[in-house]
Image (cartoon, grey):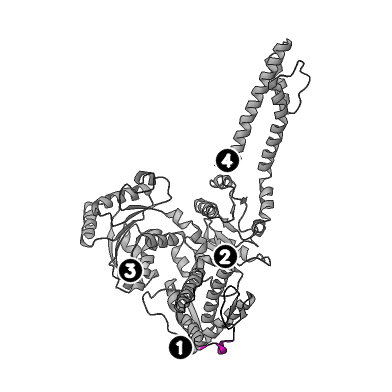
Amino acid sequence: MGLFSARRRWHLLAFAWVVLIILGYGGFVEQSRAADLGRGFLDNLYLTLQLAVLSYGDSGGDLNWRLEIARFAAPLMATGTLVQAASVVFRENFQRFRLGHFRGHTVVCGLGISGARLALALQSDGRKVVGVDPDPNGVELGALRAREVPVLVGDPKDPEVLRAVRIDRASSLVALCKSDSLNVAIAAAARGIPRTRRAVDLRCSVHLEDAELTQFLRGSGIGGHDVVRIEFFNMHERAARALVAEHVVLEKGTKPHLVVIGLGQLGRAIVLSAAQQWSEVGEGPLVATLVDREAPMRWQAMEMQHPGLVDAVDAVLLTFDVEAPTRAGLSQFTDRLEEIRPTVVAIMLDDESTALATGLYLHATIDDETVPVVVRTRGDEGLSDAVEDDQGNSRFPGLRLFPMLDRACSPALIDGGVREELARALYADHLARAAARGVEDPAWADLSDDEREAGRDAADGLIDALHENGFELLPLRHWGAAPVELTPEETDRMAERDHDRWRARRGLDGWRYSAVRDAREKVTPQLVPYTELRPEWVEYNITRIQAMPGILARAGLEVRRG
């Protein structure tokens, strides 16, 4: 709770009024005794209450120090109370007035546990954030208001509500309501509101509960020239990527054995993410042991939705209930762990107590602190106190907690997405080529907002070029397969188009032609028609186009001829 939070202000006012009443009553009692007025309890109480309505009256007798303090403090207290009451009654009006000056902020629609965590994480990252929720009695609203996060109560798909939070000047919108249809409707409503002239493109991140549907729609928000970009995401998919990046080593020369207990949405997403990344290494299928009470059925469904799993994963399926394991099932599981030593164990059960108990059992069974046993939790608080000391170090080396909501509800959720991945990958490719020529350009994180947006436009331009040449973008199905090869004619057409787009963008950004490149002065020798480029720059553009299918494959997209 902040020092000047609404609740704290009410507490301070109540305490001050109690002190004022004590001073006033004591002052009137002392006055009555000194002047021998003979006033009783009710008379002194009545005179004290008159102070609250700024009426001292003719009480008779001299003023003592208590009454002097009370009669001057009473007007200040009354004014403070009125202001505090007005701030509650007219809170929404104050919020709307405050929001009128916002620009480049993030709007979070749906302030449940996930939405509230995201809003607070964005605020901690130094970003301006506004929350919208249809429930005036939402459990998390008080915590957000205590942290001074502007919150507007209303239907988030209502254009009037979106206008009130200045969606026309916002940079990002996140739809995190419980209903997928409501989240999509929010994005559609935001797309229908005209942008202000100086506003940047709006990035809409729309949450879908179904991870497979999210995967199918992956990439639908790139390309084109819309000022409102819609990308779909799934919390479990984002959390799975974070877990794989933190705890699973998938490098050449390694022999990973992934053990996943619990094939719910998060468990399935972990297997999928690890399998896709391992297929790029190209050293055979990923060895995995999958434990679930319905392991065969869930694995079969995964193979149907993602055919690449058939060749990408060598899976052993163990069917038993972790909460009530049989002797035979437990023996089969421990035999498997002894047969092939695991490199990571991910316990992705919904019940935290069961997950932690399973984690402690496997930690003792494996007895190797170099093998991470990762236990899913909702957040950093709660059961983490049982396994971590005051410094956050595990009391059981090798046992690691994975707070799913904290990992998924982070600024990376806003900064992610296929369009962002492509822009970063293309810029990384540019940096590598520039370094080979002895040119040192700033890292992506050091670019200005306009420069990063130019990188995103470059990704859109290349996707548009693929579409114009008859290619389709589909969710990646054939993992590890060689990406589609472009013909020389296709490559040359797309390279020329990409250069023309880059040249036009540079011109709008104030760059000029010069025989020598100088980024500070915004001059470059490349600001000429494609046919007049030097051979090495033509080759640069061609290799950039040829790398596109591979970059898209790493982002989970497949280029296919239409």
Per the model, the C-alpha gap separating discs 2 and 4 is 34 Å
Numbered disc 4: secondary structure: loop
The residues bearing labels 4 and 1 have C-alpha atoms spaced at a distance of: 66 Å
Picture coordinates of residue 507 (x, y %)? 63, 78
SS for dot 3: loop
The tag earlier along the polypeptide, 1 or 2, is 2
What label does residue 487 carry, if any?
Answer: 1
Residue type, label 1:
Thr
Q: CA distance from mark 3 to mark 4?
A: 49 Å
User: Is residue 474 inside the magenta stretch?
Assistant: no
Label 2 amino acid?
Arg
Foreground pick, 171 / 155 = 171
Residue 73 horizontal/vertical position (percent): 70, 29
In magenta, the rendered stretch is 529-534
* Label whose residue precedes the other's in the sequence (4 or 1): 4
Q: Position of residue 224 (x, y in %)?
A: 58, 75
Left or right: residue 121 versus residue 160 is: left
Mark 3 lies on residue: 251
Name which residue type carries label 4: Leu
Residue 457 is drawn in which quadrant?
bottom right
Closest to the camera, between mark 4 and mark 1, is: 4
